[in-house]
């Protein structure tokens, strides 16, 4: 499983991508289709038309790295609803883990999490 720092965002492209693409092709897709910087350190996830193959690309300060996974049965599902016309959706690490397992989360409900209040310091 992947362990990502909290500062890393995970973007999933909503349109299918040709999975013959490798480092340069996926980086060009991030620039062109998602209009983002592939060397930003964020994780960019792509799925093929059949939704049984997934590739993720990220920059790790020394070069690009690709993670690829093909499901032997079933398909990958977006863990969140995709807004009309959206080029990408943002997900968290837990959702990515479940997506990589091939689980369909459309019926799942995420419970509220504890968030500490912001404390203002008097100066």
Image: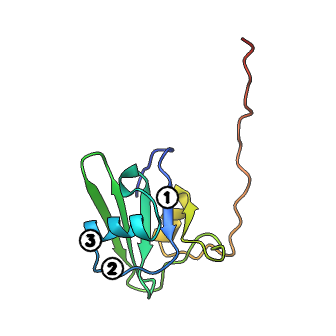
Question: Which element type, helix, strand or loop, lies under badge 1?
Answer: strand
State how far apart marks 1 and 3 are (Cα).
19 Å
Rendered location of residue 79, percent (x, y): 59, 70
Q: Residues within 10 Å of mark 2 (few under 14, many from 20)?
A: some
Label 1 sits on residue:
10
**In the visual, does 37 lie left or right of 61?**
right
Of 2 and 89, nearer the camera is 89
Q: Is residue 90 above or below residue 79?
A: above
C-beta proximity under 8 Å, tags 1 and 3 = no
State how far apart marks 3 and 2 are (Cα).
8 Å
Residue 73 image-quadrant placement: bottom left
Which label was assigned to residue 36? none
Q: Is residue 52 above or below residue 89?
A: below
Which label was assigned to residue 22? 3
Residue at position x 68%, y 70% in the image: 108
Question: Which element type, helix, strand or loop, lies under badge 2?
Answer: loop
Residue at position x 41%, y 69% in the image: 32
Placement of the N terminus among the 4 image quadrants: bottom left
Which label was assigned to residue 19? 2
Colouring style:
rainbow
Q: Residues within 10 Å of mark 1 (few under 14, many from 20)?
A: many
State how far apart marks 1 and 2 are (Cα).
19 Å
Question: Which element type, helix, strand or loop, lies under badge 3?
Answer: loop
């Amino acid at each position: 499983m992947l362990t990502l720092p909290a500062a890393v965002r995970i973007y999933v492209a909503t349109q299918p991508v040709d999975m013959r693409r490798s480092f340069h092709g996926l980086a060009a897709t991030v620039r062109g289709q998602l209009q983002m910087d592939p060397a930003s350190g964020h994780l960019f996830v792509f799925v093929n038309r059949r939704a049984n193959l997934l590739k993720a690309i990220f920059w790790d300060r020394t070069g690009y790295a690709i993670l690829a996974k093909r499901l032997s049965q079933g398909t990958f599902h977006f863990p969140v609803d995709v807004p009309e016309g959206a080029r990408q959706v943002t997900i968290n690490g837990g959702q990515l883990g479940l997506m990589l397992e091939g689980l369909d989360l459309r019926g799942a409900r995420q419970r509220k999490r504890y968030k500490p209040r912001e404390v203002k310091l008097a100066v």
